[in-house]
Image: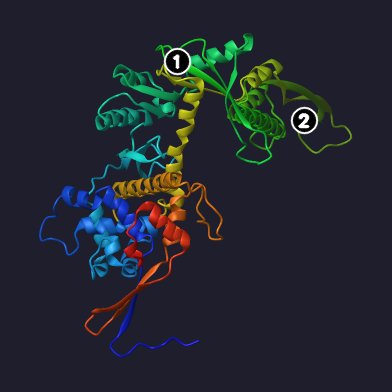
Amino acid sequence: MTTPSLPAGIRLESLEVGAAPLIRLFLERLDLPSLFERQLPPLPGRPPALPSATVLGALLANLLLARQPLYALADWASRRVPEHIGLQPGQAGLLNDDRAGRALDHLPPRITFGYNKDHRPDLKQLLYSVTISADGAVPVHCKSYDGNTTDDQVHRDTWLFLRGVIGHSDFLYVADSKLCTRENMALIADRRGRFLTVMPRTRSEDAWFRDHLLGHEVAWREVHREPSPRRRDGPDVVYHGVEGPRRSSEGYRVLWYRNSQKEEQDRQARAGQLRRARARLAQLRPVGRGRAFRTAAQARAAGQRVLEQEQVTRWLQLHIQEEIDEEYRQARPGRPGPDTAYRRVEIRRYRLWVEEDGEALAREARCDGLFPLMTNDESLDLSEALAKYKYQPFVEKRHEQLKAVFSVTPMWLKSVARVESLLWLYYVVELVQALLEREVRRRMRQAGEPSLALYPEGRDSMRPTAALVLGVLEGHRRHRLLGEQGQELRRFHDSLPTVAEQLLTLLGVDPTAYGLA
């Protein structure tokens, strides 16, 4: 097969359209291009060849569609239709990693040495906080904090900011156990706000209820049931709940739940702890050449250390067994002979063994699967509170996307001052993706479309993700025949799959960007 040649002076330009028009639509709905132009301070000296607002817009499109390294930004942009990524013709060649870095410098950093959960005090770090809405897990707030900022401090700033944006305090703030401090909860309650949080095991109310559970019947009732997330034929995950018979020391409600899946996980985790502890004790030897401990104190200290490390001290009782062996040794030094005298020597050795505390294990088993929530919202019943809480892990899902899907971690930046700026751009990336997913699912419901055939093999997707939506448009190209002076002689596009046209109609994307009427 041969490719027909073009007449002299005529050349073919092929540039990718892809999902860029769809991305541009959502960025313009957020008014982001204008926001950059209004809010970015002017650079000293003469104006740059490419404004920072334009560079950041192109960088956002790259992060959403390709996530190429900064040094490859110009090459990526040169293969795209420029107006769909916020550029004018000829501006793609002006993009480079230095210009992108200078654009990132416009956003202020807040990064320092601090506590590192990976135990790397030599690394600089920051704390990145994201807040999502209950409608589609859309990120509505992000902020980077100094690396020494504790998580509980973040909640106060976040709640006050949200109250300022919303204009009132009448919203439910759902957060992890770091919210459950007297100061944090009082801040919200005193301003007539509502909160729902996980109560940590360190609270005295937790120990009280577990003791109460041992000697009293509790009126558990089923509040939620869902299919097994692991096996189709597995048992349902069942949640039982009960209102705590005693309120917190501050007067807030404590709601107790028992999760059947967590109950099994707790049982298996405890069995694993006991198994590891016994195995380690069986192999325990004193430091040095000896094969057994020579003092009871030495043996007890070593055994107790193992029990504490495996966190089984409340279930296993440590015992020390003394063993006495007899040996005969020469009474005096020298070469042994027929008349050598010997004396009998007792050698004491100490070995460890453990005994299970059956009562303690039974008491622990009675509390398997338990977790408590604390709230000042008197209107929530057990089912509603659980449903609100179960939505909170979507925050972790957004963080997981940041690390896995967008591969933020393996990125080298010339200056640490640019890290926070890049994280803010990734916040916008997450925001656009969340808005896209929410919009396409909402439009599907309105149009009565139960699913879209977005998977490569044509399988239906009932809850399309941003990756599937963008993927079905990526690769689409616009072609132009250009004359000697660069004038356009003819324009045509690749054909679009039916499901891609369906998406454009659902989302209200201008079809002319794809060569459609």
Residue at 33%, 31% (x, y): give it.
Answer: 154
Q: Residue at the right extreme? A: 338
Which residue is nearer to you in this view: 305 or 205?
A: 205
Residue at 73%, 25% (x, y): give it.
Answer: 353
Colour scheme: rainbow
Q: Which residue is mark 2?
A: 332
Q: Position of residue 417 (x, y in %)?
A: 27, 49
Looking at the rendered structure, which numbered label has been put on residue 294?
A: none
Q: Residue at the bottom extreme? A: 8
Q: Taking 43 as reference, is 354 left or right?
A: right
Q: Position of residue 49 (x, y in %)?
A: 17, 65
Looking at the rendered structure, which numbered label has been put on residue 253?
A: 1
- Within 10 Å of disc 1 (Cα), the crowding (few <14, some 14-19, many 20+) is many
Q: Secondary structure at mark 2?
A: loop
Q: Residue at the left extreme? A: 45
Q: Taking 44 as reference, is 15 left or right?
A: right
Q: Secondary structure at mark 1?
A: strand
Q: Is residue 226 visible?
A: yes
Residue at 36%, 31% (x, y): give it.
Answer: 150
Q: Nearer the viewer, mark 1 or mark 2?
A: 1
- The CA span between labels 1 and 2 is 79 Å
Q: Is residue 494 above or below residue 177?
A: below
Q: Quadrant of residue 187?
A: top left
Q: Is residue 451 above or below residue 161?
A: below
